[in-house]
Amino acid sequence: MRTSLKCLVFYLIVGVITLNLYFLGQLYFQHQSNPENEQSKHQHQHRHSNDFFDNNNKKQDDVADKPSFHLKNSNEFLVLDWTGHQHIFREQDPIKCDFSHITREQCVAKFESVTNDGLRSHLIERCVRLLTLTVRWTDDQSRLKEADLISYHSIHMPSYNLPKLERNDKRQQYSTVYVLESEVHSSGGRDWHEIDFPMWYNLERSYPEPATYFDIKSYLDKLFAPVRIPFSKKMTSAPIIWIISNCNAYNGRQTLVQQLMTYIRIDSYGGCLNNGHSAQAQARAQSNSELYASYKFVISIENSNCEDYVTEKLIDGLSSTAVPIVASRDGKPNYKRFAPNYSYINVYDFKTVKELADYLNYLSNNETAYNEYLWFRRLPANKYAESGVTERSLQDNLRLADEILGVNATMRQWLLTKEASINKYCKLTKFIHMTYWKLIYKRKKYNRPTPNDVCLPSSDIATYFANSSTTIAAAAD
Ligand SMILES: *[C@@H]1O[C@H](CO)[C@@H](O)[C@H](O)[C@H]1NC(C)=O
Ligand SMILES: *[C@@H]1O[C@H](CO)[C@@H](O)[C@H](O)[C@H]1NC(C)=O
Ligand SMILES: *[C@@H]1O[C@H](CO)[C@@H](O)[C@H](O)[C@H]1NC(C)=O
Ligand SMILES: *[C@@H]1O[C@H](CO)[C@@H](O)[C@H](O)[C@H]1NC(C)=O
């Protein structure tokens, strides 16, 4: 998905702040004991960062040598949008962070294990400051010296020579980067490893937590909602809908869709392979949920297939209660982390385009087989679907997820890390005030992976199907 500031704003602003620490802790333990973990090559990094996160109480002593602390006079925390492209907040208005749930007792408890008296009381006071803190936003680079947190937006990130930050016992400046584009469409720059808080969709390589396309609560609300349009009332002219604007996607999805169209009717309302017009169709997928619902399948293939790069394309497909068609192999991305088993169709499960088309045609004509893909909406355990209740608390949603998907469902474990925040800047501000700075600075940092590391090769979808369907490819030309 191309950068949409509106979208970014949306995801940054929605949500809740609680559970964050708890879930990251959980993530660490589950990650350790999860035999299905495919990420072993990155395990060291992951374990390191979470170990660090979980045990910061214990460790902060080790790094306190010669304390000489200093609490800023001002009660302001200034975020500097260095790349000036985020336009999330207005300079004159404070960022609305709600720290009202934080208490002095919490701060005391947080740092009680620090043995150095001077350091401990300093850390407690710094934490208590959250109670009266005002978080402000600027994109004025000349205020670098005043800034507490420098924020980069990846696409526009300086590729090297990031501004030098002050980091000592008296003054702490931090940096963060937000990325919602895949490795193919946004670079990390040479100095990514200098960033204190890399936050992007990658579930394991973000710190202290991933940026997100998901608001877990509303996602689960929709996931467990009853089917909107039953099979018998679905569109009959075409079983599949596709609305996309990037016609030249890195993974070659358009070649597949074009070939698929020779076997099965696909309504394409976007700019690519457009074959019709719908007054309802919107340029951005978010708005198309109603329209999707009248189709049996929605093509939800991303522009590139990379580790954890799963966007609103999947969410919108599932939310519409149609069945999403996705593309994934070698765990790039691993959809089990984001959706229930048997809730989507993976094109790589088929050898040829014809085989895929035959299967989709079969499902389109067999209500029973099609409805098996909606199993998680129909179980007796899903009493909410029956009662028509759509507003549920996050706790209710999680209980429901446990009942329906099982407590050990892969998606549950990973989705929790995608919990959306009231806004990531507030979360970071809180994290910063509740963590000893040396622990943050000392965390081992890494470069952003390259597309070669974490993405399927360019045109992989096209190549994969061309290998076994050369005649079809020729016919479609
Ligand atoms: C339809 O799907 C059901 C469930 O998968 C299967 O048992 C049945 O044989 C299918 N019917 C036809 C006509 O293929
Ligand atoms: C999907 O998950 C449910 C709940 O954990 C389980 O009962 C079911 O057997 C799974 N289905 C498949 C096809 O793996
Ligand atoms: C979930 O996984 C844990 C750890 O592997 C295991 O001890 C527990 O029995 C599992 N629970 C269920 C309901 O499968
Ligand atoms: C296509 O076939 C070639 C030759 O058999 C093979 O090396 C390559 O991996 C295949 N590509 C894909 C994407 O399957």
Image: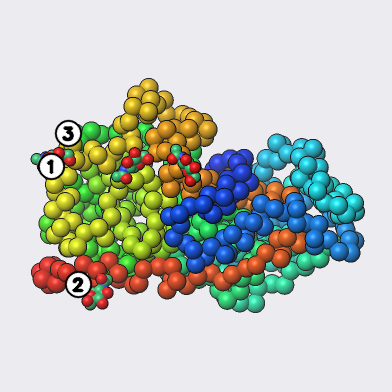
Q: How many marks?
A: 3
Q: Is residue 150 visible?
A: yes
First along the sequence among labels 2 and 3: 3
Mark 2 Cα within 10 Å, few/some/many (few <14, many 20+)?
few
State left or right for residue 121 relative to residue 404.
Answer: right
Kind of residue indicated by mark 3:
Ser
Mark 2 sits near ligand 4, with its Cβ under 8 Å away: yes
State left or right for residue 137 relative to residue 167.
Answer: left
Mark 1 sits near ligand 1, with its Cβ under 8 Å away: yes
Report the residue at 23% width, 38% height from top.
Answer: 371
Discs 1/3, front: 1
What residue sits right under mark 3 in the picture? 232
First along the sequence among labels 1 and 3: 3
Q: Quadrant of the N terminus?
A: bottom left
Percent position of residue 454, x then y? 43, 68
Report the residue at 87% width, 57% height from top.
Answer: 70
